[in-house]
Amino acid sequence: MRMFAAPTHLSFARALWFLLAAGAMLLVAGCAPGGTRTGTVTGAQPSQTTTARPTTTASPNPTETGCPGANQQVTWSPPPVTILTPQQALMQVNVKVGDGFEIALPMGSKWKLAPMTSSVLKLDTPAGYGDTARRSCIWHFTAQASGRAEVQFSQEPICVKGKACPHHVALVDFTVQVSKS
């Protein structure tokens, strides 16, 4: 005789309730902001012109990486003065007119750049390409005029047809302050 045994249907109900509660906690945690980091990221010397020399690589493909563009090895001339990641999203980024900078978002999620309304920044091409060496989706920008610009990305899960897929969207915002020199 077991002293603390519960009927099977009660054990199943408890386990189901626990799984539902754990899932709800994960969902709430996934929607919470990533912290209260503040500060600035500053670029280096302004560049005169920005050009890219892309070389397309065969794999993996954009539907596997989440990047909107093909995987490429791109060499920017001059190189970007700073590379931003989601961890710097709550910081203000400071660059100078003429500077090039990149935003590198990790592969494994579907990333989309929201339409930009400011003429302070120019999105360079290729945009949203996959860089397998950095395991990131890359957007390269050039600062065109002094002012402030917001750059926003949405992040969604990569869903495979016929498999269960979580439905959530996260937003990643960058604030860029451009100065004349």
Image (tube, rainbow, N blue to C red):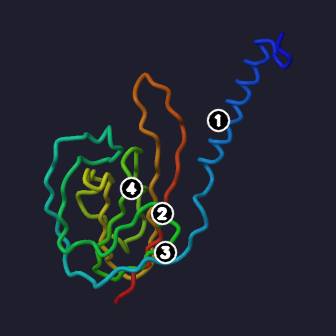
Q: Earlier in the sequence, mark 2 or mark 3?
A: 2
Q: Earlier in the sequence, mark 3 or mark 1?
A: 1
Residue 92: which disc?
A: 3
Q: Could you tell me the amino acid type at mark 3?
A: Gln
Q: Secondary structure at mark 4?
A: strand
Residue 87: which disc?
A: 2
In whole angstroms, how far apart are the C-alphas of marks 2 and 3? 12 Å
Image coords of residue 144 (percent x, y): 31, 77
Q: Earlier in the sequence, mark 4 or mark 1?
A: 1
Residue highlighted by disc 4:
105
State the residue at coordinates (35%, 79%).
43
* Front one among 49 and 72: 72
Image coords of residue 33 (percent x, y): 60, 57
Which quadrant is home to the C terminus? bottom left
Q: Which residue sits furthest right?
A: 3
Q: Could you tell me the amino acid type at mark 4?
A: Leu
Q: Earlier in the sequence, mark 2 or mark 1?
A: 1
State the residue at coordinates (71%, 24%).
15
Seen in the image, is 54 located left or right of residue 91? left
Image coords of residue 141 (percent x, y): 31, 68
Q: Residues within 10 Å of mark 2 (few under 14, many from 20)?
A: few
Q: Could you tell me the amino acid type at mark 1?
A: Gly
In whole angstroms, how far apart are the C-alphas of marks 3 and 1? 34 Å
Position above or below: 17 against 40: above
Residue highlighted by disc 1:
23
